[in-house]
Image (cartoon, rainbow, N blue to C red):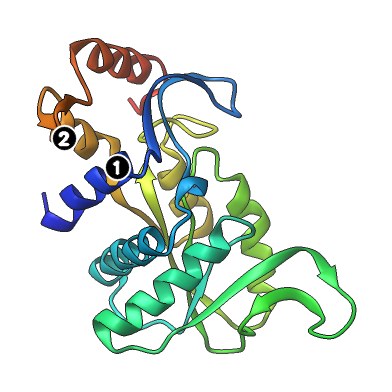
Amino acid sequence: MEAYKQEFIEFMVDSKVLKFGEFILKSGRKSPFFMNAGLYVTGAQLEKLGEYYAKAIYENYGAGFDVLFGPAYKGIPLSVATTMAFHRLYGKEIRYCSNRKEAKDHGDAGILLGSPIKDGDKVVIIEDVTTSGKSIEETFPIIRAQGDVEIVGLMVSLNRMERGKGTQSALDEIKEKYGFEANAIVTMAEVVEHLYNKEYDGNIIIDDKIKSAIDAYYEEYGVK
């Protein structure tokens, strides 16, 4: 596993963004783990987060794209932090763009926030986590409505590795339905590999009990 992935897993734990226990998801599933990117709130956290996203995007999609699109609302700070990090790390000036939940009819009018998207632009979408693909259903037509635009791919922070609406994972469903790549900085398998029965900061984050709960969850909701 790449060093930046190991660092990112520990960063999620340190930031209390990734937690283990019992959580009820929007889908109604009872999950033994939960990730909330809304808990990245400090300048230092956002700076680091942007760097991890930038490295994963560069590794998967290179630098041949023009716009980083972060769906409202959590995608807005993600796209801003990552465009800054991408320029700092790779010297490439990319533009950020997000959507408004409601179109603005005065001043900087329209549905978009940040850079316009124009014909010929190549776009990477950035999100925190995807379990059902619902946000992409809303985002995809907004981006395509801007003109002759190519969506290069989607990058999320954590691949939960569970079924979406059918038998495939949510990321695989997105790839099949929309025709672009969908990747994550890390997968839950990598999280378990890195943290299971290993002491980190004086604690065992994933012990046998939590590991059993994760295994049971994937037995029921994992991709077969």
Query: Given contact means CB atoms under 8 Å apart, are the residues at marks 1 and 2 in contact?
Result: yes
At 63% from the left and 60% from the top, the residue drawn is: 139
What is the secondary structure assignment of the residue under circle 1?
helix
What is the secondary structure assignment of the residue under circle 2?
loop
In the current view of this chain or complex, which residue is farthest to the right? 105
Q: Which amino acid, mark 1?
A: Asp
- In this view, the residue in front, 9 or 120, is 9
Placement of 71 over or under 124, stated as above or below: above
Seen in the image, is 26 located left or right of residue 18?
A: right
Q: Which amino acid, mark 2?
A: Asp
Placement of 27 over or under 121, stated as above or below: above
Dot 1 corresponds to which residue?
14
At 21% from the left and 30% from the top, the residue drawn is: 192
Q: Which mark is residue 191?
A: none
At 61% from the left and 50% from the top, the residue drawn is: 135
Dot 2 corresponds to which residue?
201
Where is residue 171? Give x, y as percent.
42, 46
Seen in the image, is 30 located left or right of residue 21?
A: right
Q: Based on the displayed image, in which of its 4 quarters is residue 57 positioned?
A: bottom left
- In this view, the residue in front, 72 or 66, is 72
Local packing at callout 2 (Cα closer than 10 Å; few below 14, some 14-19, many 20+) is: few
Q: Based on the displayed image, in which of its 4 quarters is residue 53 positioned?
A: bottom left
